[in-house]
């Protein structure tokens, strides 16, 4: 370990292996110290509990007087690259395909479907064939027809959607799984399917039953961004105080969901430190705990990470680090992203919502003001991130956790700082409101968020309540 202090990357990786973050000014001072044993000396119970090494900790360890000049607050994370093999990617897409194939195959329109190999054995034109496949390419021909290349586990085939067909208007994304019903053109060894109908996995229609008894509410909020100068602290405190008052509505809140970006973090974008009121992420979480610890103990609080939180950016994201838990009350639970909660017998699907950025770009006519339509497109595709390789980093693993296998009763998202509620075939959904004022980036994009809105879903009926805490 004597020479590790000379290598910036090795120091960062070493601390990260112990669950520790290090500030840039602390790292610079450590490198200048020329002290070979300092790296090991910094692994103490105090730093392990805090999860963070500041410049003050290094000064204290080296007995250096405090100096407030030239402070830098960027947090260094190791350059971790997920090494994925071809088998990892294949396992991921096989998982996606198999899960969605089973859902699509339940449709009456897909009875009698076959695989691509079986279709390719046919030597003459056939009026109707059916298959379930994953889209690998989407293009438009010179004549304006849509051409797809689709594949199953063993083979691929060309699919044409003529521009005079109703299915031509379907927005089809690469990597999504669809059912195809159409005629087969068999000219020698070349086989082409001319699609008449595209079958989605989709959500079946359902009726929300009103149960007898008092309401039981699950409340949702997102994108709090504690630590940011634009965090709407007064609105948030007002909301917490309303919950504590236990009036006719707030007294019936049994569950509270915080669906990601609960703090602003640091190093998320260049120059972020100038936008922060609290510079150290762990202090941001401590401040968050001061707020949410005021929620009455008979309410279960669930906290999910987002792209500003101190977990890996790639999805699925793990729960927040266990070392943070000591600052939060026992009624507060950490969740991974995404996650399906079962509350009072109802499925509540929670997803921070990074893929909504992709959907807004991929689906013509959508924008952040109409994000509800993007949410409905995810439900139609039964997948939280249909397009692989967009703005949503995904880890290839043997299990695709973004497939919506269980039909949700309630779907909660966030991320885009809008506030939209809707109902898609009996699935109530919300893009939960932010608690951050308009940022400079949003001004540049001409987007005005709708902050400080609090949504309550009754788990016993179709009732939904919205409380506005904007001051």
Image (spheres, rainbow, N blue to C red):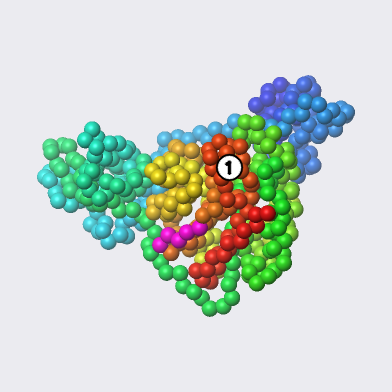
- 466 shown above or below 145: below
Picture residue at 69% right of the left edge, 69% below the top: 246
- The secondary element bearing badge 1 is classed as loop
- 39 shown above or below 45: above
- 122 shown above or below 10: below
Q: Quick one: quadrant of the C terminus?
A: bottom right
Residue 151: % across, % down: 30, 42
Range covered by the magenta-colored residues:
421-425
Relative to residue 380, is residue 441 drawn left or right? Answer: right
Q: Quick one: quadrant of the N terminus?
A: top right
Residue 262: % across, % down: 64, 48
Q: Which SS type dominates the magenta stretch? A: strand
Question: Within the image, what quadrant is residue 190 found in?
Answer: top left
Q: How many numbered marks does the figure carry? A: 1
Query: How many neighbours does mark 1 have within 10 angstroms: few (below 14), some (14-19), or many (20 or more)?
Result: many
Q: Nearer the viewer, residue 7 or 289?
A: 289
Judge whether residue 276 can be spotted in this image.
yes
Relative to residue 263, is residue 171 drawn left or right? Answer: left
Judge whether residue 403 can be spotted in this image.
no
Relative to residue 332, is residue 82 drawn left or right? Answer: left
Q: Nearer the viewer, residue 311 or 119?
A: 311
The reply to whether the magenta stretch includes residue 29 is no
Residue 408: % across, % down: 47, 60
The reply to whether the magenta stretch includes residue 423 is yes
Picture residue at 61% right of the left edge, 61% below the top: 467
Residue 466: % across, % down: 58, 62
Picture residue at 65% right of the left edge, 34% below the top: 272
Picture residue at 24% right of the left edge, 37% below the top: 144
- Quickly name the residue at label 1: 307
Q: Nearer the viewer, residue 269 or 312?
A: 269
């Amino acid at each position: 370990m004597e020479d590790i202090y000379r290598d910036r990357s090795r120091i960062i990786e070493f601390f990260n292996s112990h669950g520790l973050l290090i500030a840039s000014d602390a790292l610079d001072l450590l490198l200048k110290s020329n002290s070979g044993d300092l790296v090991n000396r910094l692994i103490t119970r105090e730093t392990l509990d805090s999860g963070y090494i500041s410049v003050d900790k290094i000064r204290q360890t080296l007995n250096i007087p405090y100096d407030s000049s030239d402070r830098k607050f960027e947090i260094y994370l190791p350059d971790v690259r997920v090494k994925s093999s071809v088998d990892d990617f294949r396992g991921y897409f096989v998982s996606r395909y198999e899960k969605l194939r089973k859902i699509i195959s339940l449709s009456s329109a897909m009875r009698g479907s076959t695989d691509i190999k079986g279709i390719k054995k046919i030597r003459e034109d056939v009026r109707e064939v059916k298959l379930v496949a994953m889209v690998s390419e989407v293009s438009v021909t010179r004549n304006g027809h849509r051409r797809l290349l689709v594949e199953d586990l063993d083979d691929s085939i060309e699919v044409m959607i003529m521009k005079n067909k109703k299915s031509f208007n379907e927005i089809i994304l690469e990597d999504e799984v669809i059912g195809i019903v159409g005629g087969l053109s068999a000219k020698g060894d070349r086989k082409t399917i001319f699609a008449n109908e595209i079958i989605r996995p989709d959500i079946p229609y359902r009726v929300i039953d009103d149960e007898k008894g008092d309401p039981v509410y699950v409340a949702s909020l997102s994108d709090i961004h504690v630590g940011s100068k634009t965090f709407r602290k007064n609105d948030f405190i007002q909301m917490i105080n309303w919950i504590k008052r236990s009036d006719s509505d707030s007294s019936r809140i049994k569950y509270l969901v915080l669906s990601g970006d609960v703090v602003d973090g640091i190093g998320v974008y260049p120059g972020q430190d100038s936008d922060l009121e609290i510079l150290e992420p762990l202090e941001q979480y401590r401040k968050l705990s001061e707020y949410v610890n005021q929620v009455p103990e008979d309410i279960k609080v669930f906290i999910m990470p987002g792209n500003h939180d101190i977990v890996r950016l790639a999805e699925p994201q793990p729960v927040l680090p266990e070392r943070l838990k000591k600052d939060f009350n026992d009624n507060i639970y950490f969740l991974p992203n995404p996650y399906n909660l079962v509350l009072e017998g109802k499925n509540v699907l929670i997803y921070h919502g990074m893929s909504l950025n992709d959907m807004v770009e991929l689906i013509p006519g959508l924008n952040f003001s109409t994000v509800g339509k993007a949410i409905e497109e995810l439900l139609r595709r039964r997948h939280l991130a249909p397009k692989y390789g967009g703005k949503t980093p995904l880890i290839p693993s043997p299990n695709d956790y973004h497939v919506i296998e269980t039909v949700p009763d309630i779907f909660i998202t966030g991320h885009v700082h809008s506030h939209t509620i809707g109902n898609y075939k009996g699935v109530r959904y919300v893009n939960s409101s932010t608690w951050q004022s308009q940022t400079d980036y949003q001004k540049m994009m001409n987007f005005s968020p709708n902050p400080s809105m609090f949504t309550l879903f009754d788990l016993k009926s179709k009732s939904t309540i919205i409380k506005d805490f904007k001051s």
